[in-house]
């Protein structure tokens, strides 16, 4: 058996035995129109550490984040660290209107109250749980733009000059609206909580 064949077999065996996504798998994102008419892309899933799996957040806090299904979200991170992590892969934190429009499904006002609709149905998302879930676990927690978990699971840092945590977490059976964070200060920029993560955006070329 040649060396290349051995490498391929080893890779297949690793994929079969591991719940970690292959490192070369590209991020999942959707590209939308901003309120000013420009285009931007937002990650479909909350940011995860490079070595995250469906059962563990991982330990790698220096490599750029990923946006893939079935990975545990990256939490315990300050706003500045989240901003830096997105910038480390040529992205940035989502701005207020970008984040909200991706969640409520409408460019500008009005839009849905929650990512799943107008009526409160907290069971559709991870808003009455005991811990964060891997991205995309609840297929019903998806906006019409195709973005998952903007209501519940973990709060998400947003804003590159004006920090705000949005979307609620797994204990936010009431406060998981698309506009959460606008009218009340939930976290200080230096907070690191196990219910506080982030999501990345980028300008579309």
Image (tube, grey):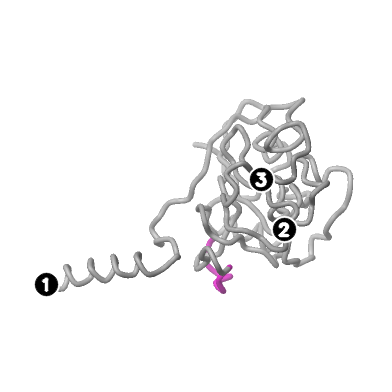
Outermost residue on the left side: it is 1
Mark pair 2, 3: CA separation: 26 Å
Q: Quadrant of residue 4?
A: bottom left
Q: Taking 56 as reference, is 11 left or right?
A: left
| Residue at 66% from the left image edge and 57% from the top image edge | 83
Residue drawn where x is 45% and y is 65% of the image: 20
Of helix, strand and loop, which one carries label 3?
loop
- Tag nearer the camera, 3 or 1: 1
Q: Earlier in the sequence, mark 1 or mark 2?
A: 1
Which tag, 2 or 3, sits closer to the chain's start? 3
> In which quadrant of the rendered image does the N terminus lie?
bottom left
Please tell me whether residue 170 is drawn above or below residue 12 in the rendered image.
Answer: above
Label 1: which secondary element: loop
Viewer-nearest of labels 2 and 3?
2
Residue at which label 2 appears? 129
**Boundaries of the magenta span:** 57-64
Residue occupied by mark 3: 94
Q: Residues within 10 Å of mark 2 (few under 14, many from 20)?
A: some
Residue 161: horizontal and vertical position, in percent? Answer: 75, 50
Name the residue nearer the viewer: 88 or 126.
126
On the image, the x and y values in percent for residue 108 come to 72, 27
Question: x%, y% of residue 16?
Answer: 34, 65
Which residue is identified by label 1? Answer: 2
Residue 66, horizontal then vertical, whole percent = 52, 57
């Amino acid at each position: 058996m040649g060396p290349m064949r051995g490498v391929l077999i080893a890779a297949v065996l690793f994929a079969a035995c591991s719940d970690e996504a292959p490192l070369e798998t590209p991020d999942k994102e959707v590209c939308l129109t901003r309120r000013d008419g420009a285009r931007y892309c937002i990650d479909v899933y909350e940011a995860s550490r490079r070595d995250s799996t469906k059962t563990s957040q991982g330990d790698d806090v220096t490599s750029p984040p990923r946006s893939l299904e079935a990975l545990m979200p990256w939490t315990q991170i300050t706003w500045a660290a989240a901003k830096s992590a997105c910038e480390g892969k040529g992205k940035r934190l989502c701005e207020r209107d970008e984040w909200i429009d991706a969640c409520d499904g409408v460019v500008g006002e009005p839009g849905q109250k929650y990512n799943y609709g107008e009526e409160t149905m907290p069971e559709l998302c991870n808003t009455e749980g005991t811990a964060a879930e891997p991205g995309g676990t609840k297929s019903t927690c998806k906006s019409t733009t195709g973005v998952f978990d903007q209501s519940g699971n973990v709060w998400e840092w947003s804003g590159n000059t004006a920090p705000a945590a949005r979307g609620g977490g797994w204990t936010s059976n009431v406060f998981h609206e698309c506009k959460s964070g606008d009218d009340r200060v939930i976290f200080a920029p230096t907070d690191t909580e196990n219910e506080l993560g982030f999501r990345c955006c980028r300008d579309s070329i």
